[in-house]
Image (cartoon, rainbow, N blue to C red):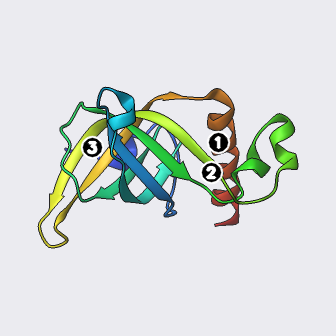
């Protein structure tokens, strides 16, 4: 009997599309070229995205996830900044799985977070919990 992918997930997923950028690590880092991607869902452990560029499973990438009103979910003093400008999470992630989609001409990736600032992870946790409670 095959295990459903959802049953293996450690973290709840919020099916919400956020604008994201993905970059392959290139040295020097100033030469990194971001690609716009569409988020499919997001969880504390990672994200699923649709992307025009091919990456290999196991490859590490940098993600920038733009989340409107993220600061209201942040612990500490960030809560006082309620504007939407510049609210994003930067993370290093590993390509956990990949599927090509010939009909769309792009790829679907499951990205596992490897390195995320702790306060951003707490804000993401609060955002997901709030989003799931509101349905």
Quadrant in the picture for residue 126? top right
Q: Are marks 1 and 2 in contact (CB under 8 Å)?
A: yes
Question: For the view shown, which residue lies furthest in the left direction?
Answer: 102
Of labels 3 and 2, earlier in sequence is 3
At x 18% / y 49%, what residue is drawn? 54
| Residue under numbered circle 1 | 125
Give x and y (percent) for residue 45.
48, 37
- The numbered disc on residue 128 is 2
Task: Judge the density around disc 3: few (<14), some (14-19), many (≥20) Cα neighbours within 10 Å.
Answer: few
Q: Is residue 45 above or below residue 131?
A: above
Q: On the picture, is 37 further left or further right than 43? A: left
Give 1 or 76, whichever is nearer the viewer: 76
At x 51% / y 60%, what residue is drawn? 18
Task: Judge the density around disc 2: few (<14), some (14-19), many (≥20) Cα neighbours within 10 Å.
Answer: many
Give 14 or 22, whichever is nearer the viewer: 22
Of labels 1 and 3, earlier in sequence is 3
């Amino acid at each position: 009997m095959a295990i459903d992918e959802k049953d293996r997930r450690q973290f709840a997923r919020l099916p919400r599309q956020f604008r994201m950028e993905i970059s392959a690590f290139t040295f020097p880092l100033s030469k990194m070229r971001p690609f716009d991607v569409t988020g499919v869902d997001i969880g504390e452990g990672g994200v699923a995205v649709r992307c025009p560029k091919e990456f290999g499973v196991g490859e590490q990438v940098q993600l920038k996830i733009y989340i409107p009103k993220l600061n209201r979910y942040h612990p500490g003093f960030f809560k006082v900044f309620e504007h939407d400008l510049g609210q994003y999470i930067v993370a290093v992630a590993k390509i956990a799985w990949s599927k090509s989609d010939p009909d769309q001409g792009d790829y679907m990736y499951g990205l596992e977070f490897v390195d995320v600032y702790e306060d951003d992870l707490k804000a993401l946790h609060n955002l997901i919990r709030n989003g799931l409670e509101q349905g």
